Image (tube, rainbow, N blue to C red):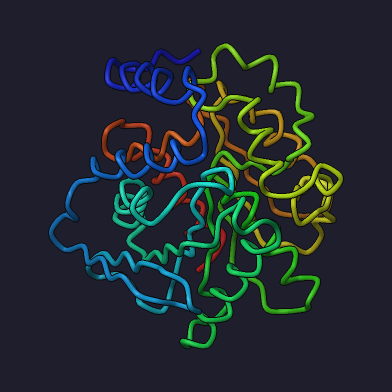
Amino acid sequence: MTKLGLRSRFWKFILRKTFKEKHLTIAEYRAQSANTAKFASRPPQGMDIEHITAADLPAAWIRPSGADRSKVVLHLHGGGYVTGSIASHLMMCIPMAQTLKMNILLPEYRLAPEHPFPAAIDDVLKIYHWLLAQGHAAKDIIISGDSAGGGLGLAVVAALRDQKEALPAAMICISPWADLTMQGRSHSTKSKVEAVLNADVLSEWALCYTNESNFSNPLVSPIFADLHDLPPLLIQVGSDEILVDDASTLAEKARSAGVDVTLKVWDGMWHVWHALGDLVPESKKAFEEIKQFIHKKTF
């Protein structure tokens, strides 16, 4: 195993104490997420944050200076479909936009249990269509997402394909939660080293999103979807995640369906380490990997 630096080991310890070892209610998770958002630094010079309403949803443009305004990363935040927001993900998306030198649109889709499946998918489809109506070509849009946002992005692209609509240029899945049946072996084999996720909590959140009989619905768990004719896909996942086997299985299924898949398993890393932004060097390196993928596979 790659030896993590002192800074990364420190934050891995803090995350475990903050998330893994506490069993919070959804309201408490949302409050904690709001408090964590306060750590987000002010945008650096040359970075513009514009809060807007898009397709009747709150959203934020994250625009680094010099970025081509025609090209967009539509990023879908994680949070198990029950939490997450613009504020909680600026810490991640600001350095991501900076590294990619691309504009990021970060929307707030509706959350469960108040708004269960398919509300989140409906909202993201509306946002995608809004981008097209604003003059952005599908070939200039990349859909990315972390955790539940990664699974959501896959479901949205599969839905667009089934509706015979123009697809985005590529997909980025960061530690995707793509199987709500939670059948992957790593849910048990990685439970002790996982720093963020708790399988019992994920089970609770899955039931908030939809009923158990619907877990294998391809739009809920895209690991069960027919993945043919999807655009190039990059999957990043940490070796110490309970979702690592899910990511590997997703990559295998997509590759078998003919999708151009790049799977990167980061040794010693935890669930969505990118969320710490500039606090750990591995975030910057992961964003650089995304940048290389985009340049190689798309524009």
Residue extending furthest toward the left: 45
Estimate the x, y position of residue 268 in percent, counting from the top left. 49, 19
Looking at the image, which is closer to me, 5 or 134? 134
Looking at the image, which is closer to me, 41 or 239? 41
What residue is shown at x 27% (from left), y 33% (from top)? 279
Count the labels in the image: 0
Estimate the x, y position of residue 220 in percent, counting from the top left. 74, 52
Q: Is residue 227 left or right of residue 90?
A: right
Question: Residue 238, located in which quarter of the rendered image?
Answer: top right
Estimate the x, y position of residue 73 in percent, counting from the top left. 46, 64
- Residue 47 lies, with reference to residue 91, above or below; the image says below
Estimate the x, y position of residue 41 in percent, counting from the top left. 19, 46
What residue is shown at x 34% (from left), y 20% (from top)? 14
Q: Is residue 188 left or right of residue 153?
A: right
What residue is shown at x 75% (from left), y 21% (from top)? 185
Q: Is residue 90 left or right of residue 74?
A: left
Looking at the image, which is closer to me, 4 or 23? 23
What residue is shown at x 49% (from left), y 82% (from top)? 136
Question: Residue 110, located in which quarter of the rendered image?
Answer: bottom right
- Residue 69 lies, with reference to residue 298, above or below; the image says below
- Residue 237 lies, with reference to residue 15, above or below; the image says below
